[in-house]
Amino acid sequence: MLGFSSQPTALMAATMDTVINVCRDGAIVDLDVEFPTHKGKKLLDSDNPYREAREAREARLAAEEAAEVLAANAEEAVEATL
């Protein structure tokens, strides 16, 4: 469960499957459940100021993972020739 004001909601909603807003006014509690669609998440993420940094980090991690796989495959190929 996350708790935050309405401003970060748009940034966080782009990464969540379900958003539940809880508002309390005295003894009355109001729940508002939202299920952002893929198109909605894409729209919310389009102006996310952290998107570029996240995409760069994801690309770097993918490149590191690919390099590890290539190194493991090369090592297996060398062992197979021995």
Image (cartoon, rainbow, N blue to C red):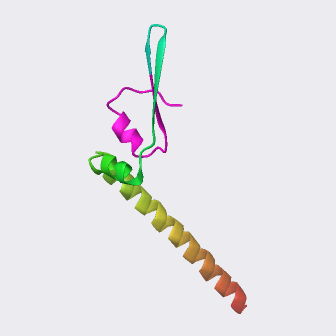
Q: Quadrant of residue 24?
A: top left
How far across and how far down the image is residue 52, in percent?
Answer: 31, 53
Residue under the image location 49 percent in, 30 percent down? 2
Q: Is residue 74 left or right of residue 12?
A: right
User: Which corner quadrant holds the C terminus?
Assistant: bottom right
User: Which corner quadrant holds the N terminus?
Assistant: top right
Establish if 41 lies above or below 1: below
| Residues rendered magenta in the picture | 1-22
Residue under the image location 26 percent in, 47 percent down? 47
How far across and how far down the image is residue 54, in percent?
Answer: 38, 52
Residue situated in front as seen by the camera: 50 or 63 = 50
Establish if 7 lies above or below 62: above
Q: Is residue 47 magenta?
A: no
Establish if 78 lies above or below 71: below
Q: Is residue 8 magenta?
A: yes
Residue under the image location 49 percent in, 65 percent down? 64
Q: Is residue 73 left or right of residue 20?
A: right
Q: Is residue 43 left or right of residue 17?
A: left
Q: Quadrant of residue 26?
A: top left
Establish if 41 lies above or below 28: below
Residue situated in front as seen by the camera: 55 or 38 = 38
